[in-house]
Amino acid sequence: MQLNTRVDPDVDELVAFVGDKQGWSKRETVEHALKKAYAAEFKELKARKEASERGS
């Protein structure tokens, strides 16, 4: 999935700042932030996927 959308300029600046500080691309920065902020949901999605793959 590709997200082509405008974000708040302050958020864009924050993503660039954190990415530069960590040595990450913008994509890596956003992925890391989402996985950390939504850790429980990410874990649930992974479990659903694994269960679906075992059922197939």
Image (cartoon, rainbow, N blue to C red):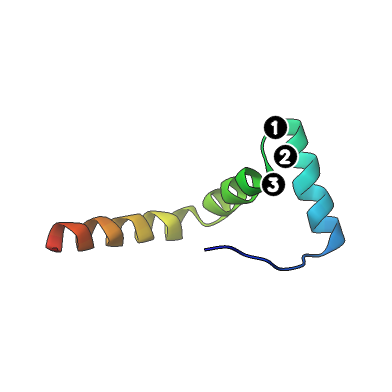
What is the spatial separation of the Cα atoms under label 3 and label 1, in whole angstroms? 11 Å
- Disc ID at residue 19: 2
Give the camera-side residue of 25 and 15. Answer: 25
**The label number, if any, that marks residue 26 in the structure image:** 3
* CB within 8 Å, label 3 to label 2: yes
Q: Amino acid under label 2?
A: Gly
Q: Mark 2–mark 1 contact, CB under 8 Å?
A: yes
Nearest-to-viewer mark from 3 and 1: 3
Q: Name the spot of residue 30 as percent of width and height, x first.
A: 64, 51
Label 2 sits on a secondary structure element that is: helix
| Secondary-structure class at tag 1 | helix
Q: What residue type is labelled 1?
A: Gln
Q: Name the residue under label 1.
A: 22
User: Element at badge 3?
Assistant: helix
- Please give left or right for residue 13 compared with residue 29 in the image: right
User: What is the CA distance from the residue labelled 3 to the residue labelled 2?
Assistant: 6 Å
